[in-house]
Amino acid sequence: GQNIDQPTEMTATEGAIVQINCTYQTSGFNGLFWYQQHAGEAPTFLSYNVLDGLEEKGRFSSFLSRSKGYSYLLLKELQMKDSASYLCAVRDPVAGNKLTFGGGTRVLVKP
Amino acid sequence: DVKVTQSSRYLVKRTGEKVFLECVQDMDHENMFWYRQDPGLGLRLIYFSYDVKMKEKGDIPEGYSVSREKKERFSLILESASTNQTSMYLCASEGRSSPGQVNTDTQYFGPGTRLTVL
């Protein structure tokens, strides 16, 4: 089976750093995606990792360890507009290369 | 930029009605998907299609069917709507958006249709 776990909710202060963890157990692995979803809106693509290590894109970074089945999304210099849900998704070639999504982590940024 | 549009943002239907949700993408992507999103359950795949006239069941296909007559259009059909199908429905199109952005196929989502079945 496939299982993707991430915390339900996190709260952080404007200007701070927040790390959202994602652990996965899938039959196969062909990449991990992070999406951002503001309330009432569509998810939008943030980052993609297929090899171990850190991918940095401005204030956002994503890390992957395939041996541990673990990823995190790091949000630096938090802004109020970063309040959103963050979805972790794994592409599994054994499951037809479809994406399996975690339940999402709601991040609330406080002033 | 990839554009995925859905026919309605909000829809209210009665139990037993037939419901059509339409999705159109403008990037010539071959792969299209229908998900529903419910609090605490995340995104769950209903049906997907990798080509015109082709459809595959996802994880929760019961009570739904789909149609892909043209490459750009993927329709989700609720044959007889029930209250447990009240949900947010998201369509996605998958492919490469622009060269160099990311070296893999990525899913691009429409704005969603919030369906309420009374």
Image (cartoon, coloured by chain):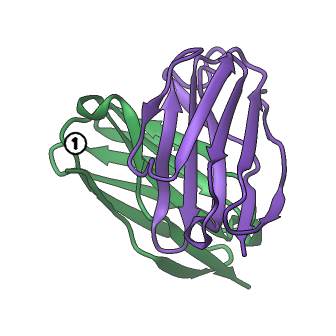
Residue A38 image offset from top left, x and y in percent: 71, 63
Give the chain letter for purple.
B
| Quarter of the view holding residue B83 | bottom right
**A105 sits left or right of B92 in the view:** left
Q: How many marks?
A: 1
Q: Residue at x 59, y 45 (%)?
A: A46
Q: Residue at x 45, y 66 (%)?
A: A19
- Identify the subunit bearing mark 1: A
Whether residue A58 is visible here, answered yes or no, is: no
Q: What residue type is labelled 1?
A: Arg
The color chain A is rendered in: green
Q: Which residue is drawn at 44% across and 53% down?
A: A88
Q: Is residue B54 above or below residue B83?
A: above
**B68 sits left or right of A50 in the view:** right
| Quarter of the view holding residue A80 | bottom right
Q: Name the residue under label 1.
A: A66
Q: Residue at x 60, y 67 (%)?
A: B82
Q: In this view, does B26 lie above or below B37?
A: above
Quadrant where the C terminus of chain B is found in the figure? bottom right
Q: In this view, does A11 lie above or below A104?
A: below
Quadrant where the N terminus of chain B is found in the figure? top right
Q: In this view, does B88 lie above or below A48?
A: below
Callout 1: 10 Å neighbours few (<14), some, many (20+)?
some
Q: Nearer the viewer, residue B95 or B50?
A: B50
| Quarter of the view holding residue A83 | bottom right
Assign a secondary structure to mark 1.
loop
**B10 sits left or right of A39 in the view:** right
Residue A92 image offset from top left, x and y in percent: 30, 35
Residue B107 image offset from top left, x and y in percent: 57, 35
